[in-house]
Image (cartoon, rainbow, N blue to C red):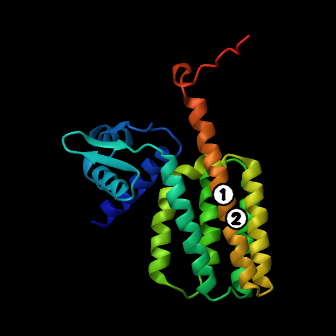
Amino acid sequence: MIVRERMSVDIHQEILRDIIKGRYAPGQRLRDAELAESLGVSRTPVREALLRLEREGFISAQKHLGFSVKGLAESEIREVYPLVRLLECSALGESELPDSEGLERLEKVSRAFIKERNDPLRRIELDSTWHATLLEGEGNAHLKRILAELKRIMFRYEYAFMENDRLVSTSIAEHESIAKALAGRNRDEAVALLGAHWDRCTAATLEEFHSVDAASATPSDKPECQEAEA
Protein backbone atom coordinates (compact mmCIF):
# COMPACT_ATOMS: atom_id res chain seq x y z
CA MET A 1 0.00 0.00 0.00
CA ILE A 2 2.81 2.42 0.92
CA VAL A 3 4.72 1.57 -2.26
CA ARG A 4 1.64 2.14 -4.41
CA GLU A 5 0.96 5.52 -2.78
CA ARG A 6 4.57 6.59 -3.33
CA MET A 7 4.36 5.48 -6.94
CA SER A 8 1.12 7.43 -7.42
CA VAL A 9 2.76 10.60 -6.05
CA ASP A 10 5.73 10.21 -8.40
CA ILE A 11 3.48 9.64 -11.39
CA HIS A 12 1.38 12.65 -10.41
CA GLN A 13 4.49 14.83 -10.40
CA GLU A 14 5.68 13.52 -13.76
CA ILE A 15 2.35 14.08 -15.51
CA LEU A 16 2.00 17.49 -13.85
CA ARG A 17 5.44 18.55 -15.13
CA ASP A 18 4.46 17.50 -18.66
CA ILE A 19 1.22 19.49 -18.46
CA ILE A 20 2.99 22.60 -17.19
CA LYS A 21 5.71 22.33 -19.83
CA GLY A 22 3.05 22.06 -22.56
CA ARG A 23 3.84 18.52 -23.63
CA TYR A 24 0.12 17.81 -23.40
CA ALA A 25 -1.92 20.37 -25.31
CA PRO A 26 -5.18 21.84 -23.97
CA GLY A 27 -8.01 19.46 -24.78
CA GLN A 28 -5.69 16.50 -25.29
CA ARG A 29 -7.02 13.19 -23.99
CA LEU A 30 -5.04 11.46 -21.25
CA ARG A 31 -5.67 7.72 -21.36
CA ASP A 32 -4.61 5.79 -18.28
CA ALA A 33 -3.75 2.67 -20.27
CA GLU A 34 -1.43 4.56 -22.63
CA LEU A 35 0.21 6.47 -19.77
CA ALA A 36 0.68 3.27 -17.78
CA GLU A 37 2.38 1.62 -20.74
CA SER A 38 4.68 4.59 -21.40
CA LEU A 39 5.60 4.87 -17.70
CA GLY A 40 6.03 1.14 -17.24
CA VAL A 41 3.54 0.85 -14.39
CA SER A 42 0.06 -0.54 -13.79
CA ARG A 43 -3.07 1.49 -14.50
CA THR A 44 -4.07 1.82 -10.81
CA PRO A 45 -1.45 4.40 -9.69
CA VAL A 46 -1.88 6.26 -13.00
CA ARG A 47 -5.61 6.57 -12.44
CA GLU A 48 -5.02 7.73 -8.86
CA ALA A 49 -2.65 10.41 -10.18
CA LEU A 50 -5.17 11.52 -12.81
CA LEU A 51 -7.95 11.77 -10.23
CA ARG A 52 -5.70 13.95 -8.08
CA LEU A 53 -4.87 16.18 -11.07
CA GLU A 54 -8.60 16.53 -11.71
CA ARG A 55 -9.21 17.62 -8.10
CA GLU A 56 -6.41 20.16 -8.47
CA GLY A 57 -7.96 21.58 -11.65
CA PHE A 58 -5.31 20.63 -14.22
CA ILE A 59 -7.47 18.14 -16.11
CA SER A 60 -11.17 17.48 -16.46
CA ALA A 61 -13.18 14.27 -16.73
CA GLN A 62 -16.21 13.60 -18.87
CA LYS A 63 -18.41 10.54 -18.64
CA HIS A 64 -17.34 7.84 -21.12
CA LEU A 65 -14.59 10.11 -22.49
CA GLY A 66 -11.99 9.93 -19.73
CA PHE A 67 -9.62 12.75 -18.86
CA SER A 68 -8.45 15.72 -20.91
CA VAL A 69 -6.10 18.65 -20.26
CA LYS A 70 -7.86 21.87 -19.29
CA GLY A 71 -7.14 24.93 -21.39
CA LEU A 72 -5.59 28.12 -20.08
CA ALA A 73 -7.87 31.13 -19.65
CA GLU A 74 -7.28 34.83 -19.15
CA SER A 75 -10.23 34.91 -16.76
CA GLU A 76 -8.43 32.46 -14.47
CA ILE A 77 -5.40 34.76 -14.23
CA ARG A 78 -7.64 37.73 -13.47
CA GLU A 79 -9.48 35.78 -10.78
CA VAL A 80 -6.71 33.81 -9.07
CA TYR A 81 -3.79 36.27 -8.97
CA PRO A 82 -5.70 39.05 -7.17
CA LEU A 83 -6.95 36.47 -4.65
CA VAL A 84 -3.40 35.34 -3.95
CA ARG A 85 -2.37 38.98 -3.59
CA LEU A 86 -5.15 39.64 -1.10
CA LEU A 87 -4.50 36.53 0.98
CA GLU A 88 -0.72 36.84 1.06
CA CYS A 89 -0.87 40.49 2.07
CA SER A 90 -3.43 39.62 4.74
CA ALA A 91 -1.28 36.76 6.02
CA LEU A 92 1.86 38.91 6.11
CA GLY A 93 -0.07 41.59 7.94
CA GLU A 94 -1.12 39.12 10.63
CA SER A 95 1.76 36.61 10.82
CA GLU A 96 4.64 36.83 13.24
CA LEU A 97 7.48 38.76 11.61
CA PRO A 98 10.44 36.54 10.65
CA ASP A 99 13.36 36.46 13.08
CA SER A 100 16.99 36.49 12.01
CA GLU A 101 16.85 32.78 11.13
CA GLY A 102 13.72 33.33 9.04
CA LEU A 103 15.38 36.20 7.19
CA GLU A 104 18.41 34.01 6.55
CA ARG A 105 16.15 31.32 5.07
CA LEU A 106 14.63 33.93 2.76
CA GLU A 107 18.11 35.01 1.71
CA LYS A 108 19.18 31.42 1.10
CA VAL A 109 16.22 30.81 -1.22
CA SER A 110 16.91 34.09 -3.02
CA ARG A 111 20.52 33.07 -3.63
CA ALA A 112 19.39 29.77 -5.13
CA PHE A 113 16.81 31.64 -7.23
CA ILE A 114 19.52 33.96 -8.60
CA LYS A 115 21.75 31.02 -9.54
CA GLU A 116 19.03 29.07 -11.34
CA ARG A 117 19.35 29.87 -15.05
CA ASN A 118 17.95 27.00 -17.09
CA ASP A 119 14.96 25.35 -15.45
CA PRO A 120 11.66 27.30 -15.29
CA LEU A 121 10.10 24.56 -13.15
CA ARG A 122 12.90 24.88 -10.62
CA ARG A 123 12.36 28.63 -10.63
CA ILE A 124 8.66 28.09 -9.91
CA GLU A 125 9.61 25.83 -7.00
CA LEU A 126 12.06 28.36 -5.58
CA ASP A 127 9.61 31.24 -5.95
CA SER A 128 6.91 29.20 -4.17
CA THR A 129 9.38 28.30 -1.43
CA TRP A 130 10.31 31.95 -0.93
CA HIS A 131 6.68 33.02 -0.56
CA ALA A 132 5.94 30.09 1.78
CA THR A 133 8.97 31.01 3.89
CA LEU A 134 7.77 34.60 4.02
CA LEU A 135 4.57 33.44 5.71
CA GLU A 136 5.90 30.55 7.79
CA GLY A 137 5.29 32.29 11.12
CA GLU A 138 2.28 31.57 13.25
CA GLY A 139 -0.86 32.64 11.44
CA ASN A 140 -4.19 31.58 9.97
CA ALA A 141 -3.77 27.93 8.95
CA HIS A 142 -6.96 27.92 6.88
CA LEU A 143 -5.81 30.98 4.94
CA LYS A 144 -2.49 29.31 4.17
CA ARG A 145 -4.25 26.13 3.02
CA ILE A 146 -6.40 28.12 0.60
CA LEU A 147 -3.29 29.93 -0.62
CA ALA A 148 -1.59 26.61 -1.35
CA GLU A 149 -4.58 25.49 -3.42
CA LEU A 150 -4.60 28.72 -5.42
CA LYS A 151 -0.85 28.47 -6.03
CA ARG A 152 -1.38 25.07 -7.66
CA ILE A 153 -3.73 26.70 -10.16
CA MET A 154 -1.07 29.28 -10.94
CA PHE A 155 1.61 26.73 -11.82
CA ARG A 156 0.65 26.42 -15.50
CA TYR A 157 0.67 30.19 -15.95
CA GLU A 158 4.02 30.59 -14.19
CA TYR A 159 6.02 28.57 -16.72
CA ALA A 160 6.17 31.24 -19.43
CA PHE A 161 6.87 33.88 -16.77
CA MET A 162 9.79 31.88 -15.38
CA GLU A 163 11.32 31.46 -18.83
CA ASN A 164 11.77 35.24 -18.98
CA ASP A 165 15.07 36.24 -17.32
CA ARG A 166 14.06 39.91 -17.13
CA LEU A 167 10.83 39.15 -15.27
CA VAL A 168 12.62 36.77 -12.92
CA SER A 169 15.33 39.33 -12.14
CA THR A 170 12.69 41.92 -11.29
CA SER A 171 10.91 39.46 -9.00
CA ILE A 172 14.14 38.67 -7.18
CA ALA A 173 14.83 42.39 -6.65
CA GLU A 174 11.29 42.85 -5.30
CA HIS A 175 11.74 39.88 -2.97
CA GLU A 176 14.91 41.50 -1.62
CA SER A 177 13.09 44.78 -1.00
CA ILE A 178 10.35 42.99 0.94
CA ALA A 179 12.94 41.12 3.02
CA LYS A 180 14.80 44.37 3.71
CA ALA A 181 11.60 45.99 5.00
CA LEU A 182 10.97 43.01 7.26
CA ALA A 183 14.56 43.14 8.54
CA GLY A 184 13.83 46.75 9.53
CA ARG A 185 10.64 45.54 11.29
CA ASN A 186 8.56 47.69 8.94
CA ARG A 187 5.54 45.47 8.42
CA ASP A 188 3.39 48.06 6.62
CA GLU A 189 6.10 48.74 4.05
CA ALA A 190 6.63 45.02 3.49
CA VAL A 191 2.90 44.44 2.94
CA ALA A 192 2.73 47.37 0.49
CA LEU A 193 5.76 46.06 -1.42
CA LEU A 194 4.25 42.56 -1.53
CA GLY A 195 1.02 43.97 -2.95
CA ALA A 196 2.93 45.91 -5.62
CA HIS A 197 4.92 42.77 -6.42
CA TRP A 198 1.74 40.78 -7.09
CA ASP A 199 0.26 43.62 -9.14
CA ARG A 200 3.30 43.57 -11.41
CA CYS A 201 3.34 39.77 -11.61
CA THR A 202 -0.33 39.75 -12.58
CA ALA A 203 0.21 42.29 -15.37
CA ALA A 204 3.34 40.48 -16.61
CA THR A 205 1.60 37.09 -16.59
CA LEU A 206 -1.30 38.50 -18.60
CA GLU A 207 1.17 39.98 -21.07
CA GLU A 208 3.00 36.65 -21.41
CA PHE A 209 -0.31 34.83 -21.81
CA HIS A 210 -1.39 37.12 -24.64
CA SER A 211 2.03 36.84 -26.26
CA VAL A 212 1.95 33.03 -26.27
CA ASP A 213 -1.68 33.02 -27.38
CA ALA A 214 -0.93 35.33 -30.31
CA ALA A 215 2.14 33.34 -31.32
CA SER A 216 0.17 30.08 -31.39
CA ALA A 217 -2.66 31.51 -33.49
CA THR A 218 -2.89 30.31 -37.09
CA PRO A 219 -2.95 32.89 -39.90
CA SER A 220 -6.68 32.40 -40.23
CA ASP A 221 -7.10 33.19 -36.53
CA LYS A 222 -5.42 36.56 -36.83
CA PRO A 223 -7.34 39.63 -38.02
CA GLU A 224 -6.58 40.75 -41.53
CA CYS A 225 -5.11 44.20 -41.98
CA GLN A 226 -7.38 46.56 -43.79
CA GLU A 227 -5.91 48.67 -46.56
CA ALA A 228 -6.05 52.38 -45.93
CA GLU A 229 -8.47 54.27 -48.07
CA ALA A 230 -6.90 56.41 -50.75
Is any atom of residue 78 visible in this view? yes
Q: Is residue 204 above or below residue 146?
A: above
The kind of residue on which mark 1 rests is: Cys
Where is residue 143? Give x, y as percent.
48, 78
Give the numbered dot on residue 197. 2
Q: Quadrant of the N terminus?
A: bottom left
Label 2, residues with CA under 10 Å away: few <14, some 14-19, many ≥20:
some
User: Residue at (78%, 79%) from the top-left corner?
Assistant: 181
* Secondary element at image label 2: helix
Where is residue 71? Give x, y as percent.
43, 43
In this rendering, position of residue 90 left or right of residue 167:
left
The kind of residue on which mark 2 rests is: His
Q: Nearer the viewer, residue 6 or 90?
A: 90
Where is residue 146? Give x, y as percent.
45, 72
Q: Which residue is mark 1?
A: 201
Q: Are marks 2 and 1 in contact (CB under 8 Å)?
A: yes
* Secondary element at image label 1: helix
Q: Nearer the viewer, residue 1 or 138?
A: 138
Q: Is residue 85 above or below residue 204?
A: below
Q: Nearer the viewer, residue 133 or 7?
A: 133
Is any atom of residue 42 visible in this view? no
- Quarter holding residue 78: bottom right
Label 1, residues with CA under 10 Å away: few <14, some 14-19, many ≥20:
many
Q: Quadrant of the C terminus?
A: top right
User: Residue at (67%, 87%) from the top-left corner?
Assistant: 97
Report how many numbered discs are placed on residues in the image.
2
Where is residue 114? Give x, y as percent.
76, 59
In this rendering, position of residue 138 left or right of residue 62:
right
